[in-house]
Amino acid sequence: MARGWESKSVEEQQAEARSEPKVPKVPQSPEQLAKKRQIEGLNLSRSRVLQQLQFATSPSHRQMLELALADLDAQLARLG
C-alpha cells in the first residue's frame, strides 16, 4: 500500500510541474549581477552586525556597531 501512495504523490508532483507556467528568466547584465551580489553581501553584513549588537555590552563596542549599521544602511540606500 505504501508504494501506491508514493507513486501517486510522484504522479501528482509531476502533473503540478507540468501545469505550472514557466516564467522565462531575463538575462541580467554583469553590472546587474554585481549590484545584486553587493546588495546580498551588505545585507549579510547588516544581519551579522545586528546579531553582534544584541550581545554587545561595552558602550564603545555598541557605538562602533551602531556606526557600522548606519554605514551599511546608507550603502544599501544608495544601491537600492
Image (cartoon, grey):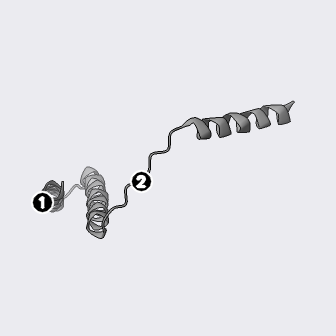
The number of numbered badges drawn on the structure is 2
Q: Closer to the camera, 54 or 78?
A: 78
Q: Residue at x 18, y 62 (%)?
A: 61
Q: Residue 18 in the image: state x and y as whole percent.
A: 61, 40
Q: Residue at x 22, y 55 (%)?
A: 57
- The amino acid beneath tag 2 is Lys
Q: Quadrant of residue 41?
A: bottom left
Which quadrant is the N terminus positioned in?
top right
Q: Closer to the camera, 71 or 10?
A: 10
Residue annotated with mark 2 = 25
Q: Can you tell which mark lies on residue 67?
A: 1
- The amino acid beneath tag 1 is Leu
Q: Element under label 1?
A: helix
Q: Residue at x 76, y 33 (%)?
A: 8
Q: Is residue 54 left or right of residue 75?
A: right
Q: Residue 28 in the image: state x and y as whole percent.
A: 33, 62
Q: Quadrant of residue 64?
A: bottom left
Mark 1: few, some, or many residues within 10 Å (few <14, many ≥20)? few
Q: Residue furthest right?
A: 1
**From the viewer's perspective, is residue 34 above or below residue 56?**
below
Q: Quadrant of residue 10?
A: top right
